[in-house]
Image: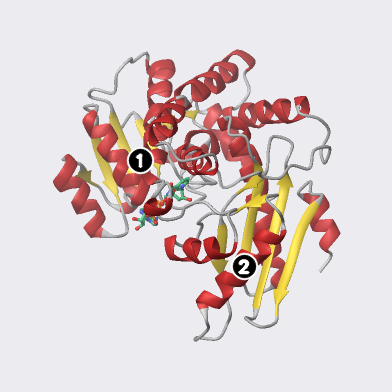
Amino acid sequence: MDVFSHLASYDYGEVHFRRDPASGMRAIVAIHDTRLGPSLGGCRFLAYAREEEALVDALRLARGMTYKAALAGVPHGGGKSVLLRPAAPVFDRAALFLAFGRFVDALGGRYITAEDSGTGLEDMELIRHETKHVTGVDVKNGGSGDPSSFTALGVRRGIEACAQLKLGRSSLEGLHVAVQGVGHVGYHLCKELAACGAKLSVADVDPLKSERAQREFGADIVPLDHIFEIECDVLAPCALGSAINDETVPRIKAKIVAGAANNQLHEPRHGDDLNQRGILYAPDYAINAGGLINVAQEVVGYNATISRDRTLKIYDTIHEIAERSMSTLTPTYRVADLMVEEKLARAGAPGSKIVSSSR
Ligand code: NAD
């Protein structure tokens, strides 16, 4: 594997590897940028067919965190870690996460970890035994709990900004929103939108989740594939990545695409396609930052009111992106990237600030 070529292609200066012989832990911590503060980002615990895939996953995701934190005004850089899940069916999970906690601690606050795919509250509690540089711990231990409701709040605010600019509507009353995926965030988003008087259509591969949205919020259930093409005002992708692709773009009838899912554009050019079709796209990492805002609050002493107030400001971020997009005829995904790149450039040259958390 050509490690330094991978680092160069994702703009990196710093990646840490650790193997713990006693537990069998093998982990990677990718620190993308610390110009705006110590790096913060989740730990993935997944099985990878090849080690190179684990490295690329960490590099790609940490870079995304730099952009998300910068745009959200959170004083952190982008980091992400991967703990490689052992191939053996039986392994000592606690030993792995304790060893991972020691790895994070040895980085001295340059990287703060959190939950991600394959990890949960119990894992964060194990890590907490070994280091203070961990978030997403139990509420009773000063943690911030499940971030989904904050993410959904931010998405609702982003939808409000889009509806104001694109449809001239100052309220969500009667707005028709099609939500793809009503899991953690999608459920809370439906709750937010229903409280504002929006009309909902939902689709989920798990019928129990759609039925819950129908029961609690009066949502219409639509077939999975039909969710992209129903006549509605807003399409809110809240399931997996790549929802916006060659196959779906031509079918979208909504004037706005604004949802929680990460990596909604299969490729950047799909953001251009939406723009050409006159569909306002709220860039995913800008609109779904509520969970990050909430978890970052934990680093300085958790306060739900502050998290909420900061998440409400996602309205302003989406509004600014959409306005700049309209005035410069630039697709919104590109405007968001430019706003981040301007902010990072003002903070100095890449690699010029090595910052640690003083937690
Ligand atoms: P989740 O797993 O709880 O929910 C996803 C839902 O999508 C599930 O109910 C699943 O059944 C459904 N789904 C999967 N494939 C589908 C398909 N093809 N069509 C319709 N439904 C489908 O996950 P979540 O935590 O709600 O996160 C949703 C998305 O938002 C993910 O992309 C995640 O990365 C992103 N996100 C989540 C948070 C957060 O706070 N949880 C923060 C930022 C971004």
Residue 184 showing in the rendered view: yes
Q: Is residue 119 visible?
A: no
Q: Nearer the viewer, residue 332 or 140?
A: 140
Give SS at disc 2. Answer: helix
Q: Amino acid at mark 1?
A: Glu
Q: Which mark is residue 100?
A: 2
**Mark number displayed over residue 159:** none
Pick the front one: 26 or 333: 26
Using a 10 Å C-alpha cutoff, classify the residue at mark 2 as few (fewer than 14 neighbours), some (14 to 19) or many (20 or more).
many
- Cα distance in 3D space between marks 1 and 2: 45 Å
Q: How is the image coloured?
A: secondary structure
In the rendered image of this protein, does residue 196 appear above or below residue 143? above
As drawn, 190 above or below 26: above
Any atom of ligand 1 within 8 Å of the CB at mark 1? no
Which disc, if any, is residue 229?
1
Q: Residue at x 70, y 63 (%)?
A: 55
Q: Residue visible at 32% across and 59% down?
A: 205
* Image position, residue 57 (x, y; %): 65, 59
Q: Residues within 10 Å of mark 1 (few under 14, many from 20)?
A: some
Residue 265 is situated, as x and y percent measured from the top left of the image, at 55, 43
Q: Residue at horizontal 72%, vertical 47%?
A: 32
Q: Is residue 173 left or right of residue 308?
A: left
Which quadrant holds the C terminus? top right
Q: Quadrant of residue 107?
A: bottom right
Q: Earlier in the sequence, mark 1 or mark 2?
A: 2
226 sits to left or right of 243: left
Q: Is residue 289 above or below residue 277?
A: below
The answer to whether 345 appears left or right of 169 in the picture is right
Mark 1 or 2, closer to the camera? 2
Instruction: Residue type at mark 2: give it.
Output: Phe
* Secondary structure type for disc 1: loop
